[in-house]
Amino acid sequence: MIRCHLSTLMGKRKMKIMDVARATGLHRNTVSLLYKEEAVRIEIDAMDKLCELFNCSVGELFEYTPEGDGETQ
């Protein structure tokens, strides 16, 4: 499973979904789905914009964890 750490990055900067949407030009729904870890796909351009905004690598924004790693489904 791919985990998205957008909510953590936003929390550290005290940013809201609309703040991220405005700063990146991404649609609010895109940011919201990533924030809630409900997105099923993401464009490379969106990852690029988020990494630029938070000055982070893709590995800091997303993390792979094997299924059944103690996660409650």
Image (cartoon, rainbow, N blue to C red):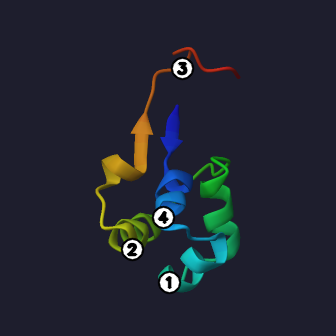
Give the residue pinned by disc 4. Answer: 43
Q: Please say if the residues under marks 3 and 1 sit with CB atoms less than 8 Å apart.
A: no
Q: Please tell me whether mark 2 sits on a helix, a strand or a loop.
A: helix
**Residue sitting at x 48%, y 64%:** 43
Q: CA distance from mark 3 to mark 1?
A: 33 Å
Residue 70: image x %, image y %?
56, 14
Q: Earlier in the sequence, mark 3 or mark 1?
A: 1
- Residue type at mark 2 is Leu
Q: CA distance from mark 4 to mark 3?
A: 23 Å
Dot 2: few (<14), some (14–19), or many (≥20) neighbours within 10 Å? few
Q: CA distance from mark 3 to mark 2?
A: 30 Å
Tell me the quarter of the image containing the C terminus: top right
Q: Please tell me whether mark 4 sits on a helix, a strand or a loop.
A: loop
Residue 13: image x %, image y %?
47, 67
Residue 27: image x %, image y %?
64, 77
Dot 3: few (<14), some (14–19), or many (≥20) neighbours within 10 Å? few
Q: Nearer the viewer, mark 3 or mark 1?
A: 1
Give the residue pinned by disc 3. Answer: 67
Q: Please say if the residues under marks 2 and 4 sit with CB atoms less than 8 Å apart.
A: no
Mark number displayed over residue 23: 1
Give the residue pinned by disc 2. Answer: 53
Q: CA distance from mark 2 to mark 4?
A: 16 Å
Instruction: Please state if 24 lies on the left or on the right of 57 as rendered.
Output: right
Q: Please say if the residues under marks 4 and 3 sit with CB atoms less than 8 Å apart.
A: no
Q: Earlier in the sequence, mark 3 or mark 2?
A: 2
- Image: 48 above or below 41: below
Q: Nearer the viewer, mark 4 or mark 3?
A: 3
Q: Please say if the residues under marks 2 and 1 sit with CB atoms less than 8 Å apart.
A: yes
- Image: 5 above or below 69: below
Dot 4: few (<14), some (14–19), or many (≥20) neighbours within 10 Å? few
